[in-house]
Image (cartoon, grey):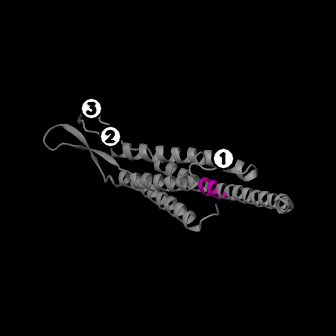
Amino acid sequence: MAVSVTILVLIIALHLIAFVFAIGAERRRSEAKVVPDEYDDRTFCVYTTDASSVYGLAAVALLLLSHTVLNGVTRCLCCGKGLVSGCSATCAVFSFILSWISFLAAEACLLAGSARNAYHTKYRGYFVKHDLSCATLRKGVFAAGAALTLLSMLTAILYYWAHSKADTGFWEKHRNEGLGLATQHHHHQGPDSDKA
């Protein structure tokens, strides 16, 4: 299997768009402030936009789509016809493992960030006690997801390239072996078949 430029561009594009969404999610994290209730002496939390959660989930979906395309094309390494042994096959196996680790880590960061960002403190506190703490997402969770998305892209490219190279070697090797066997078979059969 030769490297398909279309598949490569699709994988890179999906990862890069997911990266942009993850950065957008980091920049648009919900912020909260404690404000007093105008009717009594209690306080409550007021939150800004939840756009960060939407961006985070969009990044999750794009990353999942990219990984699905990659593993669909390569048949998830274990469901294909096999790879020719050598440096490319070893590289394909290692990059396959790394791509899954970085993909799962990125998805975990983005999902956890989206869920935590969407959580709002519902209860109220008493103004005189100052006991109300508004739950907000810690800075850097979506940024970590964005960094892992880039790492996932790099390992996905490496895995696809190594798999394509090893897979091409497999087919060329067996095609050459097949041609060699056919030529040998023809030479062995030639004189004997004429006498028979």
Q: What stretch is highlighted in magenta?
A: 155-162
Instruction: Find numbered disc 2 in the image and state the secondary structure of the residue it sits on.
Output: loop
Residue drawn at point x = 23 percent, y = 39 percent? 43
Q: In which quadrant is the N terminus drawn? A: bottom right
Image spot of residue 76 (x, y percent): 56, 48
Q: Earlier in the sequence, mark 1 or mark 2?
A: 1
Q: How far apart are marks 3 and 2 (CA)?
A: 15 Å
**Three-letter amino acid code at the position of disc 1:** Val
Residue drawn at point x = 35 percent, y = 49 percent? 31
Q: Looking at the image, is 124 positioned above or below residue 100?
A: above
Residue at mark 2: 134
**Three-letter amino acid code at the position of disc 3:** Lys
Image spot of residue 16 (x, y percent): 51, 61
Image spot of residue 17 (x, y percent): 47, 61
Q: Is residue 157 magenta?
A: yes
Residue 18: give its label: none
**Is 109 on the left-hand or right-hand side of 40?**
right
